[in-house]
Amino acid sequence: MIRLCRSGALLAICLALGWAASLAAQTPPTPRAQRPPALAAIQSEPSTQSTIFAFFNRPIATLRARVLGREPVERADGARRALDLLIEDGISGPVDWQSFDGGSLIAVAGRGVIILTTRDIDELSGETIDGVTADAASRLQQALNAAAEARTPVALLRSAAVATVVVVLALLAMWGVSRARHAAARRIADIAERTVARSGIGSEVVRASSLPVMERAFVGALGGGVQLLVIYATVGFVLRQFPYTRPWGDSMRGFLWATAKTLGLGAANAIPGLFTALVIFAVARFTTKVIEVWFNAIERGEVTSRWIYPETAQPTRRLLTGLMWVFAVVVAYPYLPGSQTEAFKGVSVFLGLIVTFGSSGIVNQIMSGFTITYSRALRPGDFVRIGDVEGTVIHLGVLSTKVKTLRQEEITIPNAVVVSQTTTDYSRFSDSEGVFTPTSVTIGYDTAWRQVHSLLLLAAERTAGLRLDPKPIVLQAGLEDFYVKYTLFFCLERQQARPFVLSALHANIQDLFNEYGVQIMSPNYVLDPAAAKTVPKTGWFPAPARPDQTPEG
C-alpha cells in the first residue's frame, strides 16, 4: 500500500507539473520587439558561441552566427520576445519564410521573427539554408499552436480531466498487479508444498534451501517490472496532454517505442543465428551420446579396443566430451545473439584474462591427472601407498586423487603431488602373481638358522589371511655384527587387511619362538643377556589374558 501511495504521488506530481508549466507559459514578457532591418543591409560573421533557439519548450533552430553585431544568444532572446508579443496579441500564424542572398527570414503573419544565415548551418553535415529554414518554420508553427492552446482554459481543463482519469486507472492497475503478485506467490508456494509432499522430501529441507526465497524474488521482480512500465506509460501520457510538456511526453513515448523496436528487431534478427547455434549444440549432444555409449561398452568389457583400456575409458570419455562441447561453443559463438557487440567482447576478454592468470595451477593438476590416468599408474579399488599415505583408491579425478585409509579417513591428494612422489601399488599383481609382504626378525648366531626358517614358516601356516600359492619364503637379509636378520615374505589374500594380518602373524611368531626357547634380538643386539629373554608356555596367559584368545584379539 505504501508503494502504491508513492507511485500515486509521483503521478500526481507529473500531473501538477504539466498543469503548472502550461499556466506559466501564458505569461509573456512585456517589451515589444522591433521589426527586422532591411535584408540588403544584413551582415553576418562566424561567432565563437552557439545556442539553440527554442520557443515554448520546443527547439526551433541552432544559431551559430553573429548578425549585425548581435551574438546568437541575443538573437534567440529577441526572437522569443517577438513571439511572446505575437501570442499575447492572439496571433499564432501563419508561419512563412523568404530567402535572400546569404540567408532567409522567418515571419509570422507577415512579421519578421528571426533571420537565418549561411553562417548558421553546418555544411559538413550536409545542411542547406533552405532546408534548415523550412524545418525551423515547421517546428515554429507547431510551437505557436501549442502556445495558443496553452492559453485556452477549456483545452487545459479537458487535458487535466483526461490526465486525472488516466492517473486513477493507473493506480487501479498497479493495485491489481500488486494483488496478483501476492496471489501468484501464494499459489507457487502451495504448488511447491504439494510437490514436496508427493516427492517425500522433507519440508524442512526445502525451507532451509533458498528455493522459496528465489521464487518470491522472481514473482516480486516481475510484478515490480509491470508496475514500473505502468508508471512510465502513465507519466508519458500525462505529459502529452499539456502543450508545454508535450515534447517531454513525446520523447518518453519515442524512447519506449524505439527500445521496443530495437529489442523486437534484435530478437527477429537473432532467430537465424540462434537456430544455427541450436543445430550445432544438437549435433554436439548427439556426438557426445555416441561417445558415451561406446566408451561405456569398453569400460564394461563388451567392446575391446587396442588403444583404450577399460580403466582409461571413463576419463577418456570425459575428456572427449569436454573437448566436443568446447568445440561446439567455439563454432557456435559467432551465431549467438550479441556476440558481436562490444559488451560481449569485453566480457569474453575479461573471462579470458581470469582463466589465463588463474589457471596455471589448475592446468598443472589437470596434466598430472592425465599422466596418472594414461600411464595406468593407479586404478580405483587398488590398495596403494602414496608418500606417507596408505589406503584404497576410491576416486581418480581431473584435479586430485582420493584415498580411503585403513582408519576410514578420506584423504585428498593433488595430482601434481601424486606424480612427484613414489607410488606403490600393492593390488596390481595381487590376484595373479601375488605381491610379497615382508616382516623381519633378528636372531643371534647361537641359534640354528634352519630352526629359525622353520619357525617363521610355521607361524605363516598358522596365520589366517595368507595365500598358500605362492608359498611363503624366508631369506637371510643380512649377517650383522651380533645377529642374523631373517625376513619372511608372504602374500596376502586381501591387501586391505594388511595391518590385521601382520598383527596376527607377529603374535604367532612370538608364541612359536617362546615355545621353542628362541630369543628374538630385535631391533638391535649388543651383547648376550644373563638369562634368555623368552616366555615359557606356562606363562603365556597371565591375567587378564585368556587361553581362548586368538592372535587377532
Image (cartoon, rainbow, N blue to C red):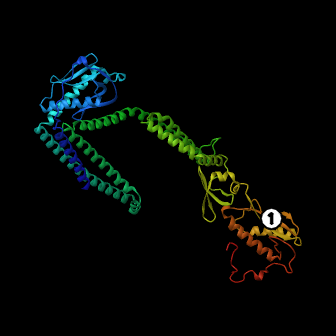
x and y percentages locating residue 536 in the rendered image: 79, 81
Task: Identify the residue under disc 1.
Answer: 487
> Would you identify the image quadrant in which residue 99 lies?
top left
x and y percentages locating residue 98 in the rendered image: 21, 19
> Would you identify the image quadrant in which residue 381 lies?
bottom right
x and y percentages locating residue 86 in the rendered image: 15, 30
> Would you identify the image quadrant in which residue 156 lies?
top left
Q: Residue at x 12, y 36 (%)?
A: 152
x and y percentages locating residue 423 in the rendered image: 69, 55
Compare residues 515 and 318 and report the one nearer the observer: 318
Compare residues 362 and 298 and report the one nearer the observer: 362
Which quarter of the image is occupied by the N terminus? bottom left
Q: Disc count in the image?
A: 1
Decide if residue 504 is on the left or right side of residue 120: right
Q: Residue at x 87, y 66 (%)?
A: 480
Decide if residue 491 is on the left or right side of residue 76: right
Question: Is residue 542 visible from the viewing direction of this image?
Answer: yes
Q: Residue at x 21, y 37 (%)?
A: 246
Residue at the front extreme? 69
Q: Secondary structure at mark 1?
A: strand
